[in-house]
Amino acid sequence: SKELGRNMYQLFDQSMSKRNYQSFILERDLRKAIMNDEFVAYFQPRVNALTGKVTSAEALIRWNHPQVGLVSPGDFIPLAEESGLIIPMGKWMKRRVCEQLVAWREAGIPLVPISVNISSQRFLQKDFAKDIRALLEEYQLEGKYLEIEITENSIMKNEETVTKTLEELKELGVKIYIDDFGTGYSSFNYLKTFQLDGVKIDRAFIQNISSESENASITTAMIKMAHHLKLEVVAEGVETKQELDYLVEQNCLQIQGYYFGRPCPIEEFEEKYLLTV
Ligand code: C2E
Ligand code: CA
Ligand code: CA
Ligand code: CA
């Protein structure tokens, strides 16, 4: 019993030294969140700058914590990734999005594609595309209504698996975007290697963009390169008219950011962007 006590103490001590008490609590709550259905999906519109039309939306997770209230992904995604909870969380989100698309279809509301963030952990598993296929079949949805955002890190890890997965997704008509484009690997070689549909230029490059800024030259170069490779370009984090004007000048017409709309609850998204004449 003395032995047992010491072992237990060591176990406790080890786990506590690795993470602090707060993240211990957070992880405990996060586990419960999945069972208790505490996640909420917010949608943010992506707009065509020329027509002003909403062409798609990005699904962004929120956690409605029973004590703390709404928690942003920045505060729990890292822990979710570290603990593996990102997998059931992602599963929840994909289903939530499919459910919503079906609900809109049944209500006669014209669908827009919804883009989902996929953790590299999940994307790199061999059965990822198969799972997407099964999901689309279950909900009787065309692949074009589901889009996937992955980061550069996801794609650089296992070329064989990634190539296969991308091929299968292409077959399904599910579009793939590179998220946070420009912030990861400095080599863009992977753009030639893999069949991708588009890139989303990270907000860091868009901020305060104007013709004189350094960000402007980088962004312009990225837009040119993407177009040259026949990739779509989406600009993220567009907040001002000045940023918008610059991007339109550079022929980057797919815009996401507070300028056109913040992420919002799905009912609000529907009212604001899908039911308007
Ligand atoms: P992200 O994929 O790069 O998503 C864009 C983030 O930029 C979102 O933050 C969005 O609210 C924010 N944003 C959009 N427009 C603007 C703007 O004009 N100005 C500013 N300042 N911010 C803007 P959010 O919702 O806090 O999400 C943060 C990150 O958490 C996401 O970055 C993504 O990496 C991750 N994330 C969110 N939802 C999910 C999810 O369901 N699954 C996974 N794996 N990751 C998620
Ligand atoms: Ca994203
Ligand atoms: Ca992004
Ligand atoms: Ca980001």
Image (cartoon, rainbow, N blue to C red):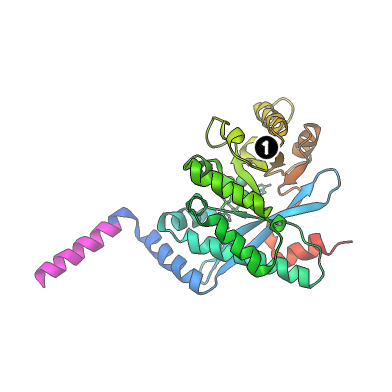
Across and down, in percent, residue 78 comes to 47, 53
Q: Residue furthest right?
A: 277
User: In terms of image quadrants, where is residue 243?
Assistant: top right
As displayed, is residue 182 above or below residue 41?
Answer: above
- Taking the magenta stretch, the answer to whether it contains residue 13 is yes
Numbered disc total = 1
Please tell me how crowded label 1 is: few (under 14), some (14-19), or many (20+) other residues with Cα within 10 Å: many
At x 50% / y 64%, what residue is drawn? 88
Q: Which residues are magenta?
A: 1-16
Q: Quadrant of the C terminus?
A: bottom right
At x 65% / y 41%, what residue is drawn? 199
Q: Quadrant of the N terminus?
A: bottom left
Query: Is residue 262 shown to the viewer in this render?
Result: no
At x 65% / y 51%, what residue is drawn? 171
User: In terms of image quadrants, where is residue 10?
Assistant: bottom left
As displayed, is residue 257 above or below residue 106?
Answer: above
Across and down, in percent, residue 136 comes to 65, 63
Which element type, helix, strand or loop, lies under badge 1? helix
Across and down, in percent, residue 111 comes to 77, 61
Of residue 194 and residue 272, the one placed in the foreground of this image is 194
Of residue 174 and residue 74, the one placed in the foreground of this image is 174
- Taking the magenta stretch, the answer to whether it contains residue 69 is no
Query: Is residue 152 shown to the viewer in this render?
Result: yes
- Direction from residue 28 to residue 140 in the image, left or right: right
The residue that disc 1 covers is 206
Q: Is mark 1 within 8 Å of ligand 1?
A: no
Magenta highlight: main SS: helix
- Direction from residue 13 to residue 22 in the image, left or right: right
At x 74% / y 27%, what residue is drawn? 211
Q: Amino acid at mark 1?
A: Ile
